Amino acid sequence: MSTYQAGVVGFFISVFVFYLIAIQLGGKPANLKQFFHDRNVSLNVFSLAAGNLALAQGIVFVLMGTRQFGFLYLLVPGVVFLAQFVVYPKLITWVNEDLYLRGTVLAGISDAMDIVAGKPVRFQMFTTIYIVLTFLFGLCYEIFVSSNWLAAAMFPDQTVAGKGVIAFVILALTLSYVITGGYRTVQRTDCIQVIFGTTLIIGILVILLSNGPAAPQSKSSPLLPTGVSLWVAFLTMLIAPFATQIYSILNHALASHQQNVKERKRLFKVAGLVIFFIYIALAIVALYYNHTQGDALDELNAWLSSSTKSYAFQNVFLVMFATIGMGAIIMSTVDTMMITVAQVSFEGFVKGNSKSEETKDRQLRNIRTVIPGVFVPVFAILAWWWYVKPDSFNLLFAVASPCQAIAPMIVCLLWLSKRGKVSAILRPVIGNIRYVDLYYMLFFLTLVGAFVALATNWKWSLSVGFFAFLISSFVSFIIFIQQKSLTTIS
C-alpha cells in the first residue's frame, strides 16, 4: 500500500466510522427540544472541547500566531483561559434564567428589548445575520485548510477537484447525521473525536520535538514582535479571542442546554481547562521550534509532503493515522457549526422556540428540509477561496472584527438585564438615534473598515477591531454611569 492510498483509507475510515456512530447513538428526536438540546453536562464538556479543538481556527491559528508574534503569543491561550474559566462563568451569573426560555441568550435579550420598546428592535435579526455570516466563513475556512492538508496526504497532485471531493464528502456525511439526529449525534461523536484530535496534536508535538535542539538559524522567528503596527496587531490578537468568548454568550447553544448556573459554570470551566493545556503545549513547542529550527507550520507541511512520497511502512502508518485524526477534527468542527447555525437561524429569522416539546411539529420537518441549503453558500465561498487564494488567516480576522465592537455592549446588556433596566440601551442619544443604534453603526463601520485596511496592510487591518473595542467600551461605560446615577437619584 502506498502512502497516498493509506491517506485515502485513513480519511474514509474516519468519516464513515463517525457517521455510523452518529447514526447509531444519536437517536431520532421527536420534537425541537430533543433535536437541539441535551442536558448531559459531562458529554457537553466533550462537545465544547471538540468544538474548540479545530484544525484551521485551532492548530493552524496557534502555529501562525507563534510565527508572527513570537513569545508573546503565549498570552493568547492565557487570555482565552481567563475568559472561559473566570470571566465567562461570572457573566453567566448575570443571565436570568428567563432569557433561556426560547433557546439562546440572544433570543431572550431580543424579546426583552422588544417588550420594553413596544415594537420590534430587530436586534436579534441584525445579530443573527452576522452570526450566520461568521459561521459560514469559519466553516469554509476550516474546510479550506483541512482539504489542503488532506489532499496533500491523499492525492499525488493537489487539484481543486480533489479538494472539492473531500469537501463534498465531509459536508454530505455531516449534514446527513445532523439532519437525522440533531445535536445528540454531534454530542456523541464529539466524545470520540476529541480523543482522536488530541492524539493528532500529540503527534504534531512529537514531530516538532524530534527535530531539535539545534543552534538558532538565520531564518528563525523573533521571540518578540517588532514594529508599531505588529504590536497593535498583537494587542488585537490578544483581545479578539477574549471578545469572541464574550460575544459567543449570545449564540452559545451549549449554554442553552443546561438548566441552571451551576451546570453552565461547570461546563465552561472544565472545557476551558482542557483546551488551555492542549493549546499552551502546542504553542510552547511551536515557539521552541520556530526559534531553534525555522518555521513549525512549514515543517509540518514538509513532513506531510515527504511522508506521502515514501513507501516505508512507518510512513504509511503515520499518514493513515494523520488523516484519521484530521478527518475527526474537521467533522467535529463542521457538525458543531451546522447545528449552532440551525438553532440560531431558527430562533432569529422565524422567532422559533428551540425548546418546544410539541410532537409532530411541522417546524422540525421544515428545519430538516432547509439545513441542506448550506451546501450552496459553502461551495460558492469555497470555489472563490480556491481560485482567488486570498490571505485566509487575516480575512477571517476581518470578518470576525465586529465581535470586538459588540462584546462590551453584550456585557452592558447582561448587566442591565440582570437589573431589569434594558430600556437604558434604548435611550435616545442624539435626536432619534439610540445607544443601540450607535452599536449598529459601529458594527457596520468596523466590518467595512477591516476589509478596507486588509487591502492596505494586514497588520493595521487587525487593529480596526481593537479600536472598535475601545470605542464600544467607552459607550458602554457611559451607559453604565448614567444608569448608576439614575439608580442613586431614585
Image: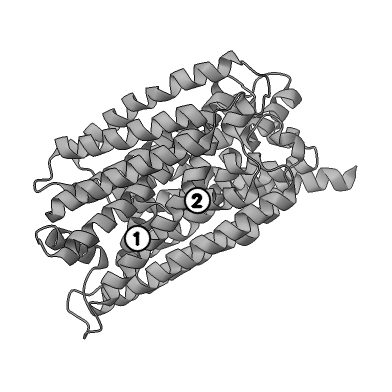
- Asked whether the viewer can see residue 227, the reply is no
Q: Is residue 167 above or below residue 6?
A: above
Residue at numbered disc 1:
200
- Asked whether the viewer can see residue 3, the reply is yes
Q: Quadrant of the N terminus?
A: bottom left
Q: Identify which residue is drawn at 62% across, 34% down.
A: 106
The 10 Å Cα crowd at callout 2, few under 14, some 14 to 19, many 20 or more, is: many
Q: Quadrant of the C terminus?
A: top right
Q: Identify which residue is drawn at 12% across, 65% down.
A: 312
> In the visual, does 304 lie left or right of 426?
left
Whole-number angstrom distance, CA of label 2 to CA of label 1: 15 Å
Which residue, as the protein is rendered here, is positioned at the far top?
362
The 10 Å Cα crowd at callout 1, few under 14, some 14 to 19, many 20 or more, is: many
Label 2, secondary structure: give it.
Answer: helix
Q: Quadrant of residue 197?
A: bottom left
> In the visual, does 124 lie left or right of 150?
right
Q: Amino acid at mark 1?
A: Leu
Pinpoint residue 474: horizontal percent, then vertical percent: 61, 50
Pinpoint residue 342: horizontal percent, then vertical percent: 50, 29
Q: Quadrant of residue 169?
A: top left
Residue at numbered disc 2:
191
Pinpoint residue 76: horizontal percent, then vertical percent: 46, 64
Front-most of 265 and 108?
265
Q: Identify which residue is drawn at 55% across, 24% down.
A: 346
Pinpoint residue 465: horizontal percent, then vertical percent: 45, 49
- Marks counted in the figure total 2
Q: Amino acid at mark 2?
A: Cys
